[in-house]
Image (cartoon, rainbow, N blue to C red):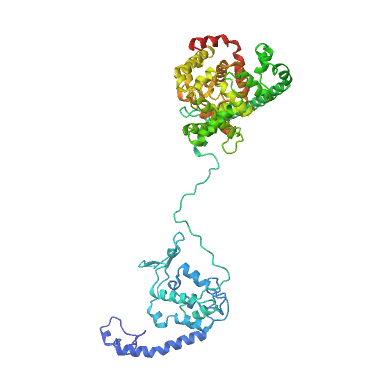
Amino acid sequence: MQLEPSSSRLDLDDDAFADGDDDEAYYKFTPDAIRQDIARHELSWADTEASADSEHPHSFEVDESVSTLDMNGTGPHSPASSPPLDSIALDEDDMAGQFSQISLSESTPDDEVEDLQLAVPNDDDLAVESPHPYPNVVIDVSKSPTHRVTVSELDGRSSRTSDESPPRRASMQSSHSEVAGRPPQNGANSLPGAASSSPSILPIPHSAAPPVPVPLSPKNPTHRPTRSTGPSAFEKVMSRTRPSFLPPKSREEDNKHLSEWESMMKQSRATAEKRRRAFQERRFAREKKIEDSLSVWEKEIVPDWKVVHKNAALRKLWWQGIPTKLRAPMWANAVGNALALSKDNYRTCLARAKRALGSGAFPSATLSLIEQDISTTLPSLHIFHHETGPLYPDLKDMMCAWVVSRSDEGLGYTLGAAKIAAMLLINMPVQQAFIVMRNLMERHCMRSFFGGEGSKDDVDAYYRIFDTLLADGMPKIYFNFKQHQISPAAYLPDWLLPLFLDHLPFEACARIWDVLLLEGDSFLYRAALGILAVLEPRLFFPDRKELLELLRGENKAALDVATREGRPLDGGRYEIYGVDEETVWERIDSMHDWWKDSTWARLIQRELPDL
């Protein structure tokens, strides 16, 4: 607005600092003067705008950028039709709903155009808002969709998120939601038509492509673990050839020693593999020799097995191993039948056990011990498994019958009996195995270890006998055990109760049993001393706990090596130490120089005079 002075006289020679200024022309700010000035210039503004449009008909170039181009519209729109950013700051969920309702057809129903025009604010509403600069828009994709867009003014007076809209924008959103709620019938030009009727509505571009979803970040971001692809920083500087408490080596010396160590380890593995192949060759040769001697067995030993006590060559042949097909009769003959048990003894004892189980008179604690003992019996063979083992029912019945046969003497069940019964079941029928087992358990040494508390004195006597033999044969091991207070009671029962089946490979046990059933209790101690001789290089630990772990077959270092080399751990516990049939029998045979049966008889007479 421009106010005219009351006088239009212009004096070019007028002095700006003259005292007569107050008498010259001045402006009147009365209400009547203002109304007259507005009325006089209203028409001149309209004429000026019309003349400007006629003189510059192409002053506005069409903006054909992707952001403003109406792909399905009927014509271009001028930049004047772009509304403020606040008018289109809709939530992403609302925008997605509006885009899904936009039709792609060219025709627009009249009723939809009227509805859209009702939502368009009039000029009076737009005139109330004062122009303002563009706001700052901050988009944070890590927030939820309703709080992702933040709009702030330049002067910092206000800041709002996308869900905080002014009243006018809220009314526009409500009008858009009404239109979006209608079914999309030929409404492609409804929004462009509304935009052309008012310069404050932004035309929404139509596109056949679906909106690209914005990936949402996790609400609780956590550090994603990464797998190491190489040595750590510590491993790169750690020396593998010198203890940490010593001064470090130079890098060149350390690399040299590491290379030498790797070469030695490679050579050691090659030597171990060569030794294993040689052992397999000797084993196959020995088995072939046993099979070739089958004719000698059938001709000279089977008719009268007692000839081996008279003929040294035949006795040596027995020590080399009994052919598999002859083990059942040879074992039965060697054990004998001192109890004079009939063939029906097993059937009678089993019937008594079945009646006790059916009536509930069978002790539940004893039944639990039987199940526990069977579960650890020759696990590498898998034939005594409680679910899939074919010999599991026979073994359990045999153990129940054996418990009943001992109940008359007041003896209970002792862990280890299932191992002995299993070894017999593998080689002979259950009736014959039961008779052999009962007679084998009647040998004094076995009866003492399976006799419970009543035979504790006899067991202590057998411990003293073993200590004496150990001191004579291996004094260094004996002294080390005494220094760490390790008596035979700490390891000998674990060997003798299952007759070595828990600790030695199955083939080694079978050959030990061949000689054990022939020679009697003395060979039990000879075999035990042979096992200690194999373990001798490992029996000088300065710690008692480590010694006991080694004797139980639970040495951690040996277990780690066996696991790393992929060797099975369900066989004999001493297999992790490299104990096999060949090494055990090599040490047993080496005892011929100092072992004497007369020494055994003298010790038995001294410790067990009533035997």
Tell me if residue 576 can be seen: no
Report the front residue among 302 and 27.
Answer: 302
Where does the image place residue 145, in percent across and percent down from the top left?
45, 64
Where does the image place residue 16, in percent across and percent down from the top left?
30, 81
The quadrant holding residue 163 is bottom left
**7 horizontally vs 605: left or right:** left
**329 horizontally vs 481: left or right:** right
Where does the image place residue 570, in percent across and percent down from the top left?
57, 32
Report the front residue among 415 and 67.
Answer: 415
Vertical comparison of 385 with 127: above or below: above
The quadrant holding residue 387 is top right
Looking at the rendered image, the quarter that the N terminus falls into is: bottom left
**276 horizontally vs 8: left or right:** right
Vertical comparison of 579 with 195: above or below: above
Where does the image place residue 373, in percent across and percent down from the top left?
52, 31
Q: Residue at x 53, y 9 (%)?
A: 602
Q: Residue at x 48, y 36 (%)?
A: 360
How many discs appear?
0
Q: Residue at x 46, y 25 (%)?
A: 545
Vertical comparison of 541 with 367: above or below: above
Vertical comparison of 155 with 354: above or below: below
**385 horizontally vs 27: left or right:** right
Report the front residue among 458 and 215.
Answer: 458
Report the front residue among 539 and 310.
Answer: 310
Tell me if residue 43 can be seen: yes
